Amino acid sequence: MNLPASGDRARYDRATAHLDAPLAIVDLAAFDANADDLVRRAAGKPIRVASKSVRCRTLLERVLARPGFAGIMSYTLAESIWLARSGFEDVLLAYPSADRTGFAELAGDPKLAAAVTVMVDDPAQLELIDGSRDGGTQEIRVCLELDTALQLLGGKVRVGARRSPLREPSRLADLARTVSARPGFRVVGIMGYEGHVAGVGDSIAGRPLRSRAIRLMQAAARKELAARRAEAVRAVRAVVPDLEFVNGGGTGSVQQTAAEDAVTEIAAGSGLYVPRLFDNYTSFRGLPAALFAQPVVRRPGVGVVTVLGGGYPASGAAGADRLPVPYLPQGLRYDPQEGAGEVQTPLLGSPADDLLIGDRVWFRHAKAGELCERFDALHLIEGDRVTATVPTYRGEGRTFL
Protein backbone atom coordinates (compact mmCIF):
# COMPACT_ATOMS: atom_id res chain seq x y z
CA MET A 1 0.00 0.00 0.00
CA ASN A 2 1.15 3.54 -0.71
CA LEU A 3 2.04 5.16 2.61
CA PRO A 4 1.02 8.77 3.17
CA ALA A 5 3.66 11.45 3.56
CA SER A 6 4.17 12.72 7.06
CA GLY A 7 1.63 15.43 7.80
CA ASP A 8 -0.77 14.65 4.93
CA ARG A 9 -3.70 13.98 7.22
CA ALA A 10 -3.22 17.21 9.17
CA ARG A 11 -2.77 19.12 5.94
CA TYR A 12 -5.95 17.76 4.40
CA ASP A 13 -7.89 18.33 7.61
CA ARG A 14 -6.71 21.95 7.78
CA ALA A 15 -7.47 22.59 4.13
CA THR A 16 -11.04 21.32 4.40
CA ALA A 17 -11.87 22.39 7.97
CA HIS A 18 -14.46 24.86 6.65
CA LEU A 19 -16.24 22.15 4.65
CA ASP A 20 -18.68 19.47 5.72
CA ALA A 21 -17.87 15.85 4.93
CA PRO A 22 -18.51 13.66 2.97
CA LEU A 23 -16.27 15.41 0.45
CA ALA A 24 -13.68 14.59 -2.20
CA ILE A 25 -10.34 16.23 -2.89
CA VAL A 26 -7.54 16.17 -5.43
CA ASP A 27 -4.07 17.05 -4.19
CA LEU A 28 -2.71 19.06 -7.13
CA ALA A 29 0.95 18.54 -6.24
CA ALA A 30 0.43 14.77 -6.38
CA PHE A 31 -1.71 15.05 -9.53
CA ASP A 32 0.98 17.04 -11.34
CA ALA A 33 3.78 14.76 -10.13
CA ASN A 34 1.85 11.75 -11.43
CA ALA A 35 1.38 13.50 -14.78
CA ASP A 36 5.13 14.11 -14.98
CA ASP A 37 5.82 10.45 -14.20
CA LEU A 38 3.48 9.30 -16.98
CA VAL A 39 5.26 11.57 -19.45
CA ARG A 40 8.64 10.28 -18.32
CA ARG A 41 7.56 6.69 -18.79
CA ALA A 42 6.03 7.43 -22.21
CA ALA A 43 9.51 8.46 -23.42
CA GLY A 44 8.41 11.03 -25.96
CA LYS A 45 5.18 9.45 -27.17
CA PRO A 46 2.05 11.53 -26.52
CA ILE A 47 -0.39 10.40 -23.86
CA ARG A 48 -4.09 10.39 -24.65
CA VAL A 49 -6.01 10.98 -21.42
CA ALA A 50 -8.68 8.42 -20.53
CA SER A 51 -11.58 10.62 -19.45
CA LYS A 52 -13.42 7.86 -17.56
CA SER A 53 -10.53 7.89 -15.09
CA VAL A 54 -10.78 11.66 -14.50
CA ARG A 55 -14.46 12.70 -15.04
CA CYS A 56 -13.80 16.35 -14.39
CA ARG A 57 -13.45 18.86 -17.23
CA THR A 58 -11.26 21.22 -15.23
CA LEU A 59 -8.70 18.50 -14.54
CA LEU A 60 -8.85 17.24 -18.12
CA GLU A 61 -7.99 20.77 -19.23
CA ARG A 62 -5.22 20.99 -16.66
CA VAL A 63 -3.45 17.82 -17.76
CA LEU A 64 -3.90 18.49 -21.48
CA ALA A 65 -2.20 21.85 -21.02
CA ARG A 66 0.96 20.02 -19.94
CA PRO A 67 3.64 18.97 -22.46
CA GLY A 68 3.40 15.29 -23.34
CA PHE A 69 -0.39 14.99 -23.33
CA ALA A 70 -2.60 15.17 -26.42
CA GLY A 71 -6.21 14.18 -26.94
CA ILE A 72 -8.91 12.43 -24.93
CA MET A 73 -10.06 8.84 -24.86
CA SER A 74 -13.76 8.95 -23.99
CA TYR A 75 -16.17 6.23 -22.93
CA THR A 76 -19.59 7.06 -24.45
CA LEU A 77 -20.67 8.86 -27.60
CA ALA A 78 -22.77 11.34 -25.61
CA GLU A 79 -19.71 12.21 -23.54
CA SER A 80 -17.60 12.52 -26.69
CA ILE A 81 -20.02 14.99 -28.23
CA TRP A 82 -20.29 16.99 -25.01
CA LEU A 83 -16.51 17.23 -24.72
CA ALA A 84 -16.15 18.21 -28.36
CA ARG A 85 -18.77 20.93 -27.94
CA SER A 86 -16.84 22.07 -24.85
CA GLY A 87 -13.76 22.77 -26.96
CA PHE A 88 -11.79 19.50 -26.86
CA GLU A 89 -10.69 18.99 -30.45
CA ASP A 90 -9.44 15.37 -30.45
CA VAL A 91 -11.73 12.82 -28.82
CA LEU A 92 -11.36 9.08 -29.40
CA LEU A 93 -14.36 7.02 -28.29
CA ALA A 94 -12.84 3.85 -26.84
CA TYR A 95 -15.95 1.66 -27.10
CA PRO A 96 -18.51 0.93 -29.82
CA SER A 97 -21.81 2.73 -29.43
CA ALA A 98 -25.47 2.12 -30.25
CA ASP A 99 -26.45 5.76 -29.58
CA ARG A 100 -28.51 6.53 -32.69
CA THR A 101 -29.29 10.07 -31.58
CA GLY A 102 -25.60 10.73 -31.02
CA PHE A 103 -24.63 9.37 -34.43
CA ALA A 104 -27.25 11.59 -36.10
CA GLU A 105 -25.75 14.59 -34.30
CA LEU A 106 -22.22 13.57 -35.29
CA ALA A 107 -23.11 13.00 -38.93
CA GLY A 108 -24.88 16.34 -39.16
CA ASP A 109 -22.18 18.62 -37.73
CA PRO A 110 -18.84 19.12 -39.51
CA LYS A 111 -17.03 20.36 -36.38
CA LEU A 112 -18.16 17.38 -34.32
CA ALA A 113 -17.32 14.95 -37.10
CA ALA A 114 -13.81 16.39 -37.31
CA ALA A 115 -13.25 16.19 -33.54
CA VAL A 116 -14.67 12.76 -32.66
CA THR A 117 -13.38 9.34 -33.75
CA VAL A 118 -15.64 6.34 -33.11
CA MET A 119 -14.69 2.73 -32.40
CA VAL A 120 -15.63 -0.07 -34.80
CA ASP A 121 -14.87 -3.80 -34.73
CA ASP A 122 -17.82 -5.18 -36.73
CA PRO A 123 -19.43 -4.21 -40.07
CA ALA A 124 -22.82 -4.27 -38.31
CA GLN A 125 -21.74 -1.16 -36.42
CA LEU A 126 -21.32 0.65 -39.73
CA GLU A 127 -24.86 -0.35 -40.63
CA LEU A 128 -26.13 1.06 -37.35
CA ILE A 129 -24.30 4.34 -37.90
CA ASP A 130 -25.60 4.71 -41.46
CA GLY A 131 -29.11 3.91 -40.28
CA SER A 132 -28.81 6.68 -37.68
CA ARG A 133 -27.57 9.50 -39.90
CA ASP A 134 -31.02 11.11 -40.33
CA GLY A 135 -29.81 12.95 -43.41
CA GLY A 136 -26.37 13.81 -42.01
CA THR A 137 -23.62 13.40 -44.61
CA GLN A 138 -20.46 14.13 -42.65
CA GLU A 139 -17.61 11.62 -42.96
CA ILE A 140 -17.27 9.57 -39.78
CA ARG A 141 -13.76 9.03 -38.44
CA VAL A 142 -13.24 5.38 -37.49
CA CYS A 143 -10.76 3.59 -35.23
CA LEU A 144 -10.42 -0.20 -35.40
CA GLU A 145 -9.88 -2.17 -32.20
CA LEU A 146 -7.45 -5.08 -32.00
CA ASP A 147 -8.10 -7.88 -29.52
CA THR A 148 -5.04 -7.94 -27.28
CA ALA A 149 -5.79 -11.00 -25.13
CA LEU A 150 -3.17 -13.67 -24.63
CA GLN A 151 -4.30 -17.09 -25.83
CA LEU A 152 -2.60 -20.27 -24.64
CA LEU A 153 -2.97 -23.98 -25.38
CA GLY A 154 -4.28 -23.37 -28.87
CA GLY A 155 -6.86 -20.87 -27.70
CA LYS A 156 -8.29 -23.01 -24.91
CA VAL A 157 -7.01 -20.53 -22.30
CA ARG A 158 -7.65 -16.81 -22.68
CA VAL A 159 -6.11 -14.10 -20.51
CA GLY A 160 -7.49 -10.62 -21.07
CA ALA A 161 -10.70 -8.67 -21.47
CA ARG A 162 -13.33 -9.81 -23.96
CA ARG A 163 -13.44 -6.79 -26.20
CA SER A 164 -12.89 -6.82 -29.96
CA PRO A 165 -13.48 -9.94 -32.10
CA LEU A 166 -10.60 -8.81 -34.34
CA ARG A 167 -7.61 -10.85 -33.27
CA GLU A 168 -5.75 -11.76 -36.46
CA PRO A 169 -4.05 -8.94 -38.39
CA SER A 170 -5.75 -10.14 -41.57
CA ARG A 171 -9.19 -9.62 -40.04
CA LEU A 172 -8.27 -6.11 -38.97
CA ALA A 173 -7.11 -5.38 -42.52
CA ASP A 174 -10.30 -6.87 -43.95
CA LEU A 175 -12.41 -4.54 -41.84
CA ALA A 176 -10.21 -1.61 -42.88
CA ARG A 177 -11.05 -2.48 -46.52
CA THR A 178 -14.74 -2.69 -45.70
CA VAL A 179 -14.72 0.72 -44.01
CA SER A 180 -12.63 2.33 -46.74
CA ALA A 181 -14.96 1.03 -49.45
CA ARG A 182 -18.04 2.41 -47.72
CA PRO A 183 -18.93 6.05 -48.47
CA GLY A 184 -19.09 8.31 -45.45
CA PHE A 185 -16.40 6.59 -43.36
CA ARG A 186 -12.63 6.88 -43.01
CA VAL A 187 -10.22 4.71 -41.02
CA VAL A 188 -7.85 6.95 -39.05
CA GLY A 189 -6.55 4.76 -36.23
CA ILE A 190 -6.02 1.45 -34.46
CA MET A 191 -6.45 0.84 -30.75
CA GLY A 192 -5.42 -2.10 -28.59
CA TYR A 193 -5.86 -1.99 -24.82
CA GLU A 194 -3.85 -4.68 -23.05
CA GLY A 195 -5.80 -4.60 -19.80
CA HIS A 196 -4.27 -7.87 -18.58
CA VAL A 197 -0.93 -6.05 -18.52
CA ALA A 198 -1.84 -2.41 -17.93
CA GLY A 199 -4.65 -3.05 -15.47
CA VAL A 200 -3.45 -6.00 -13.39
CA GLY A 201 -0.98 -5.47 -10.57
CA ASP A 202 2.00 -7.82 -10.46
CA SER A 203 2.91 -7.51 -6.77
CA ILE A 204 0.04 -8.63 -4.56
CA ALA A 205 0.73 -8.31 -0.84
CA GLY A 206 0.99 -11.69 0.84
CA ARG A 207 0.69 -13.65 -2.40
CA PRO A 208 4.22 -14.12 -3.79
CA LEU A 209 3.43 -17.15 -5.97
CA ARG A 210 0.44 -15.47 -7.60
CA SER A 211 2.50 -12.31 -8.14
CA ARG A 212 5.23 -14.31 -9.87
CA ALA A 213 2.66 -16.06 -12.04
CA ILE A 214 1.23 -12.70 -13.08
CA ARG A 215 4.68 -11.38 -13.96
CA LEU A 216 5.39 -14.44 -16.10
CA MET A 217 2.01 -14.13 -17.82
CA GLN A 218 2.54 -10.44 -18.51
CA ALA A 219 6.02 -10.98 -19.93
CA ALA A 220 4.62 -13.58 -22.34
CA ALA A 221 1.65 -11.35 -23.18
CA ARG A 222 3.83 -8.33 -23.95
CA LYS A 223 6.07 -10.35 -26.26
CA GLU A 224 3.17 -11.95 -28.14
CA LEU A 225 1.21 -8.73 -28.46
CA ALA A 226 4.15 -6.61 -29.63
CA ALA A 227 4.73 -8.96 -32.56
CA ARG A 228 1.03 -9.31 -33.42
CA ARG A 229 0.32 -5.58 -33.07
CA ALA A 230 3.23 -4.71 -35.36
CA GLU A 231 1.92 -7.17 -37.94
CA ALA A 232 -1.62 -5.76 -37.62
CA VAL A 233 -0.39 -2.20 -38.11
CA ARG A 234 1.54 -3.22 -41.22
CA ALA A 235 -1.53 -4.98 -42.60
CA VAL A 236 -3.82 -2.01 -42.01
CA ARG A 237 -1.29 0.51 -43.34
CA ALA A 238 -1.22 -1.48 -46.57
CA VAL A 239 -4.90 -0.58 -46.88
CA VAL A 240 -4.80 2.85 -45.22
CA PRO A 241 -1.33 4.35 -45.78
CA ASP A 242 -2.26 7.64 -44.09
CA LEU A 243 -3.26 6.05 -40.77
CA GLU A 244 -3.09 8.82 -38.16
CA PHE A 245 -2.44 6.94 -34.90
CA VAL A 246 -1.94 3.60 -33.19
CA ASN A 247 -3.05 3.74 -29.57
CA GLY A 248 -2.05 1.25 -26.90
CA GLY A 249 -1.27 0.74 -23.28
CA GLY A 250 -2.63 2.03 -20.02
CA THR A 251 -1.26 3.37 -16.75
CA GLY A 252 0.31 0.08 -15.71
CA SER A 253 2.15 -0.56 -18.99
CA VAL A 254 3.14 2.89 -20.24
CA GLN A 255 6.86 2.29 -20.62
CA GLN A 256 6.54 -1.19 -22.11
CA THR A 257 3.92 -0.16 -24.68
CA ALA A 258 5.80 3.02 -25.56
CA ALA A 259 8.79 0.86 -26.46
CA GLU A 260 6.84 -0.72 -29.36
CA ASP A 261 7.73 1.00 -32.63
CA ALA A 262 4.25 0.32 -34.03
CA VAL A 263 2.54 2.32 -31.26
CA THR A 264 2.34 6.09 -31.79
CA GLU A 265 0.48 7.14 -28.62
CA ILE A 266 -0.29 5.84 -25.14
CA ALA A 267 -3.60 5.87 -23.27
CA ALA A 268 -3.55 6.62 -19.54
CA GLY A 269 -5.78 8.23 -16.97
CA SER A 270 -5.89 6.31 -13.68
CA GLY A 271 -2.24 7.16 -13.09
CA LEU A 272 -3.22 10.78 -12.47
CA TYR A 273 -5.32 9.94 -9.40
CA VAL A 274 -3.50 6.68 -8.43
CA PRO A 275 -6.33 4.73 -6.77
CA ARG A 276 -5.63 1.78 -4.50
CA LEU A 277 -5.54 -0.86 -7.28
CA PHE A 278 -2.30 0.71 -8.48
CA ASP A 279 -0.48 -0.11 -5.25
CA ASN A 280 0.22 -3.59 -6.65
CA TYR A 281 2.69 -2.70 -9.42
CA THR A 282 6.44 -3.11 -9.59
CA SER A 283 6.81 -0.99 -12.74
CA PHE A 284 5.96 2.37 -11.15
CA ARG A 285 4.93 4.05 -7.91
CA GLY A 286 2.55 6.98 -8.03
CA LEU A 287 1.22 9.38 -5.40
CA PRO A 288 -2.38 9.06 -4.19
CA ALA A 289 -3.96 12.28 -5.47
CA ALA A 290 -7.72 11.71 -5.21
CA LEU A 291 -9.21 11.01 -1.79
CA PHE A 292 -12.58 11.24 -0.13
CA ALA A 293 -13.44 11.94 3.51
CA GLN A 294 -16.29 10.52 5.61
CA PRO A 295 -17.20 12.03 9.00
CA VAL A 296 -17.13 10.10 12.25
CA VAL A 297 -20.72 9.99 13.53
CA ARG A 298 -20.56 7.25 16.19
CA ARG A 299 -18.16 5.70 18.70
CA PRO A 300 -19.79 2.31 19.43
CA GLY A 301 -17.02 1.06 21.69
CA VAL A 302 -13.31 0.71 22.30
CA GLY A 303 -11.35 0.45 19.06
CA VAL A 304 -14.27 1.23 16.75
CA VAL A 305 -15.80 4.30 15.12
CA THR A 306 -18.58 4.59 12.59
CA VAL A 307 -18.40 6.95 9.62
CA LEU A 308 -21.28 8.14 7.48
CA GLY A 309 -21.61 6.26 4.17
CA GLY A 310 -18.52 5.01 2.38
CA GLY A 311 -19.92 1.99 0.52
CA TYR A 312 -18.55 2.97 -2.87
CA PRO A 313 -17.48 -0.29 -4.56
CA ALA A 314 -15.66 -0.22 -7.89
CA SER A 315 -16.66 -2.04 -11.05
CA GLY A 316 -15.18 -5.41 -11.99
CA ALA A 317 -15.34 -8.87 -10.49
CA ALA A 318 -16.71 -8.49 -6.95
CA GLY A 319 -14.16 -8.83 -4.17
CA ALA A 320 -12.46 -7.05 -1.31
CA ASP A 321 -10.08 -5.36 -3.74
CA ARG A 322 -13.06 -3.44 -5.20
CA LEU A 323 -13.72 -1.62 -1.93
CA PRO A 324 -12.26 1.75 -0.96
CA VAL A 325 -9.51 1.51 1.61
CA PRO A 326 -9.34 3.57 4.84
CA TYR A 327 -6.15 5.59 4.35
CA LEU A 328 -5.83 8.27 7.04
CA PRO A 329 -5.37 7.83 9.91
CA GLN A 330 -3.37 4.71 9.19
CA GLY A 331 -4.33 1.45 10.83
CA LEU A 332 -8.11 1.41 10.40
CA ARG A 333 -9.87 -1.57 8.81
CA TYR A 334 -13.37 -2.73 8.00
CA ASP A 335 -15.48 -4.88 10.28
CA PRO A 336 -15.57 -8.17 8.31
CA GLN A 337 -19.24 -8.64 9.20
CA GLU A 338 -20.28 -5.28 7.73
CA GLY A 339 -17.68 -4.06 5.26
CA ALA A 340 -18.27 -0.68 3.60
CA GLY A 341 -21.88 0.31 4.15
CA GLU A 342 -24.34 2.31 2.09
CA VAL A 343 -25.26 4.62 4.98
CA GLN A 344 -22.72 3.82 7.69
CA THR A 345 -19.37 2.06 7.89
CA PRO A 346 -17.83 0.80 11.15
CA LEU A 347 -14.03 0.94 11.23
CA LEU A 348 -11.86 -1.03 13.62
CA GLY A 349 -8.37 -0.45 14.95
CA SER A 350 -6.52 1.38 17.71
CA PRO A 351 -6.54 4.74 15.82
CA ALA A 352 -10.32 4.76 16.30
CA ASP A 353 -9.85 5.67 19.97
CA ASP A 354 -8.22 8.96 19.01
CA LEU A 355 -11.07 10.01 16.70
CA LEU A 356 -13.86 12.28 17.95
CA ILE A 357 -17.36 12.82 16.65
CA GLY A 358 -17.05 15.09 13.61
CA ASP A 359 -13.47 14.07 12.79
CA ARG A 360 -12.94 12.68 9.34
CA VAL A 361 -11.45 9.52 7.93
CA TRP A 362 -9.78 9.76 4.53
CA PHE A 363 -10.29 6.95 2.01
CA ARG A 364 -8.84 5.95 -1.35
CA HIS A 365 -11.20 4.53 -3.96
CA ALA A 366 -10.30 1.24 -5.62
CA LYS A 367 -10.50 2.79 -9.08
CA ALA A 368 -10.00 6.30 -10.40
CA GLY A 369 -12.88 8.16 -12.05
CA GLU A 370 -15.63 6.14 -10.42
CA LEU A 371 -15.12 8.24 -7.31
CA CYS A 372 -16.60 11.16 -9.26
CA GLU A 373 -19.91 9.33 -9.70
CA ARG A 374 -20.40 9.78 -5.94
CA PHE A 375 -19.45 13.45 -5.59
CA ASP A 376 -20.65 16.61 -7.31
CA ALA A 377 -17.41 18.49 -6.73
CA LEU A 378 -13.70 18.05 -6.22
CA HIS A 379 -11.89 20.40 -3.84
CA LEU A 380 -8.46 21.11 -5.27
CA ILE A 381 -5.77 21.34 -2.62
CA GLU A 382 -2.44 23.12 -2.81
CA GLY A 383 -0.40 22.84 0.35
CA ASP A 384 -2.89 23.18 3.18
CA ARG A 385 -5.47 25.27 1.30
CA VAL A 386 -8.38 24.57 -1.00
CA THR A 387 -7.59 26.81 -3.96
CA ALA A 388 -10.60 25.86 -6.11
CA THR A 389 -13.74 23.77 -6.05
CA VAL A 390 -14.67 22.34 -9.44
CA PRO A 391 -17.58 20.22 -10.64
CA THR A 392 -17.25 16.58 -11.58
CA TYR A 393 -19.25 15.24 -14.52
CA ARG A 394 -22.00 14.47 -11.99
CA GLY A 395 -21.82 18.04 -10.71
CA GLU A 396 -22.48 19.26 -14.24
CA GLY A 397 -25.48 16.98 -14.51
CA ARG A 398 -23.67 14.52 -16.76
CA THR A 399 -23.99 10.86 -15.83
CA PHE A 400 -23.18 9.03 -19.04
CA LEU A 401 -23.40 5.47 -17.74
Image (tube, rainbow, N blue to C red):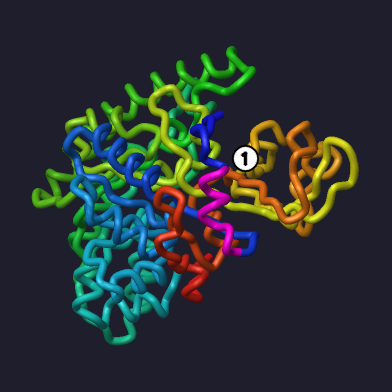
Q: How many marks?
A: 1
Magenta stretch encompasses residue 279: no
- For this orientation, the residue located farthest to the bottom is 135
Residue name at image x 51 percent, y 46 percent: 11
Magenta stretch encompasses residue 12: yes
* Above or below 151: residue 276: below
- Can I make out residue 207 in this image? yes
Q: Amino acid at mark 1?
A: Leu
**Residue 180 at x, y percent in the picture:** 18, 60
* Above or below 301: residue 186: below
The residue closer to the viewer here, 71 or 395, is 395
The residue closer to the viewer here, 144 or 295, is 295
Occupied quadrant, residue 82:
bottom left
* Above or below 267: residue 24: below
**Residue 57 at x, y percent in the picture:** 37, 65
- Can I make out residue 246 in this image? no
Tell whether 237 sits left or right of 378: left
The residue closer to the viewer here, 394 or 295, is 295
Asked which secondary structure carries label 1, the reply is: strand
The magenta span reads 10-19
Tell whether 332 sits left or right of 182: right
Q: Which residue is mark 1?
A: 328
**Residue 232 at x, y percent in the picture:** 24, 38
Residue name at image x 61 percent, y 48 percent: 314
**Residue 20 at x, y percent in the picture:** 63, 64
Occupied quadrant, residue 303:
top right
Residue name at image x 49 percent, y 43 percent: 162
Quadrant occupied by the N terminus: top right
Q: Residues within 10 Å of mark 1 (few under 14, many from 20)?
A: many
